[in-house]
């Protein structure tokens, strides 16, 4: 039987190396590519067509949730497991709505990581126990503020989400244009569209929204422009 082809998407090298070493010890699993940010994850996924992706959420430039949406649009049969240190409502809701079929906390055991990979490859879902409890509670409570924000972000185009993340990371329009390979005028156009869709009209509020919707982590060092 051929090994399960895996892509690792994690911006912290030491975590990525640890995952690679751990998975190399498991029979039937093969890491075919490694990405250090969301944009690279999308590119490598299209190149290698992995069967399973371990995707960190908080990556610079393009977060793991938006990278997941872009990958699954092109490769609907690929299974994505979100890997994160956080399990608050915004991240859990955004992860499931992005199409991820697994959600693991970084504190999880090596055994659970390997089991999650095998389960999702077989068409099952796999969530850390604390996340399963949180999903059940969210279902019982119905829509809340963070879940509502996550759904609103789904109305944005992929490019608008990229622009929003870079704004929230403190990037000026010129830096954003350079990072995305587009003109400053195009950045301003995207910025106007996302502000209109979200009914938010200043940078500080956009940043708070990005945090509440799980687009960036609250621990990210921000410079409000």
Image: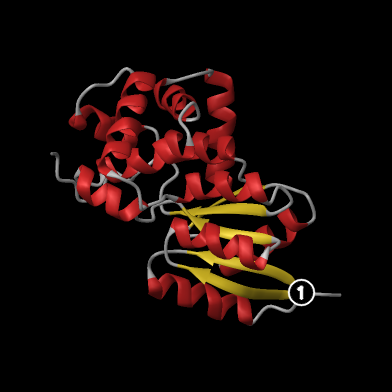
80 horizontally vs 39: left or right: right
Q: Is residue 188 visible?
A: yes
In the rendered image, the quadrant that contains the C terminus is top left
Task: List the residue tagged with mark 1.
Answer: 3
Percent of width and height locating residue 131:
54, 42
Residue plotted at (35% across, 33% down)? 190
Q: In this view, does 62 lie above or below 106?
A: above
Check disc 1: other Cα within 10 Å, few if <14, some if 14-19, many if 20+. few
In this view, the residue in front, 176 or 86, is 176
Percent of width and height locating residue 76:
71, 47
In this view, the residue in front, 130 or 54, is 54
How is the rendered protein coloured? secondary structure
87 horizontally vs 122: left or right: left
Q: How many labels does the image show?
A: 1
221 horizontally vs 69: left or right: left
172 horizontally vs 31: left or right: left
Percent of width and height locating residue 66:
49, 44
Residue plotted at (36% across, 53% down)? 181
């Amino acid at each position: 039987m051929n090994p399960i082809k895996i892509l690792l998407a994690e911006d912290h090298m030491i975590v990525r190396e640890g995952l690679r070493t751990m998975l190399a010890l498991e029979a039937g699993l093969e890491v075919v590519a490694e990405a250090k940010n969301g944009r690279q994850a999308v590119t490598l996924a299209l190149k290698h067509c992995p069967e399973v992706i371990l995707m960190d959420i908080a990556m610079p430039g393009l977060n793991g949730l938006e990278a997941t949406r872009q990958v699954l649009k092109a490769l609907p049969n690929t299974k994505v497991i979100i890997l994160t240190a956080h399990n608050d409502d915004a991240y859990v809701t955004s992860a499931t709505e992005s199409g991820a079929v697994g959600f693991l906390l970084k504190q999880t055991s090596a055994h659970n990581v390997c089991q999650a990979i095998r389960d999702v490859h077989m068409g099952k879902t796999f969530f850390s126990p604390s996340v399963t409890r949180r999903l059940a509670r969210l279902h019982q409570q119905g829509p809340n503020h963070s879940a509502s924000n996550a759904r609103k972000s789904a109305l944005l185009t992929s490019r608008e989400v990229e622009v929003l993340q870079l704004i929230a990371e403190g990037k000026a329009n010129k830096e954003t244009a350079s990072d995305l390979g587009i003109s400053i005028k195009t950045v301003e156009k995207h910025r106007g569209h996302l502000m209109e869709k979200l009914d938010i009209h200043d940078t500080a509020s956009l940043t708070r929204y990005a945090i509440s919707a799980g687009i960036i982590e609250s621990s990210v060092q921000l410079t409000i422009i």
